[in-house]
Amino acid sequence: MQNTRGIAEDELISQCKKGSLKYQEMLYKHFYGYAMGISLRYSFNRDDALEAVNDAFIKVFKAIHNYDSNKVFKAWLRTIVVNTTIDRRRKDMKHQLNLEIDDNIQIHSGNNPSGRLDAADILKMMDALPAIQRTIFNMYEIDGYTHDEIAETLEIPASSSRVYLSRAKEKLRNIINAEAQKHE
């Protein structure tokens, strides 16, 4: 078990199940960075991600009595954070389902003269994708959801999930190829 200032995760969770505000705050602080990292992948900006994380922790504390201690807490938390962030964005995404990004978008990695991509470059590329494509790419490629799970979560057909993933990958390939050509 990981420790939070000398307190094991199972003790944090046990005390949270008893309704201890002190331990809820400790659990929040312990997993805040993890939750923000997940939420940022699905949000347009840090403020949206923070709101989703806070909403997710409210859900965690309301449902913590349902948490099965035989399972990994981080996985349970991740599911709640992903679903909460997606729920917050669902309305916005419905308006963007038919929008397409300009295929000529260029991402400049001006800080990287070697031509190699770093994490910041990759995040810029991800930001260049339309919201629905970025969300589906994250869910499928990073978080390991199936197309059926994505379809259920986003309330779209599974075939649409496959199409949006394919489009996201193609756009990312185009951006990477454009960057590579600039550095030749």
Image: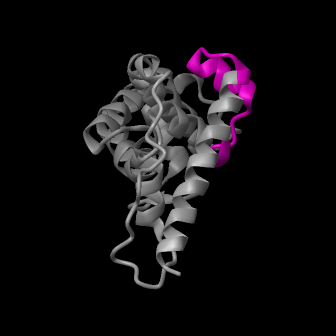
Question: Closer to the camera, 79 or 116?
Answer: 116
Looking at the rendered structure, the number of numbered marks drawn on it comes to 0
Please name the residue shown 57% across and 45% down the image: 74
Specify the segment rendered in magenta: 140-159
Q: Is residue 142 magenta?
A: yes
Question: Closer to the camera, 171 or 38?
Answer: 171
Where, by quadrant of the figure, is residue 111 drawn?
A: bottom left
Residue 129 locus on image (x, y percent): 47, 42
Residue 128 locus on image (x, y percent): 42, 47
Q: Residue extending furthest left?
A: 47
Q: Is residue 42 visible?
A: yes
Q: Is residue 77 above or below residue 111?
A: above
Please name the residue shown 25% across and 39% down the image: 47
Question: Closer to the camera, 8 or 139?
Answer: 139
Q: Is residue 68 above or below residue 120?
A: above
Please name the residue shown 40% across and 45% down the image: 40
Residue 161 locus on image (x, y percent): 66, 28
Q: How is the image coloured?
A: one colour
Q: Is residue 143 above or below residue 1?
A: above
Q: Is residue 183 magenta?
A: no
Where, by quadrant of the figure, is residue 35 drawn?
A: top left
Question: Closer to the camera, 2 or 171?
Answer: 171
Which quarter of the figure is the N terminus placed in? bottom right
Please name the residue shown 61% across and 56% down the image: 173
Q: Is residue 60 visible?
A: no
Q: Is residue 11 above or below residue 173?
A: above
Residue 48 locus on image (x, y percent): 30, 35
Q: Main secondary structure of the magenta part?
A: helix
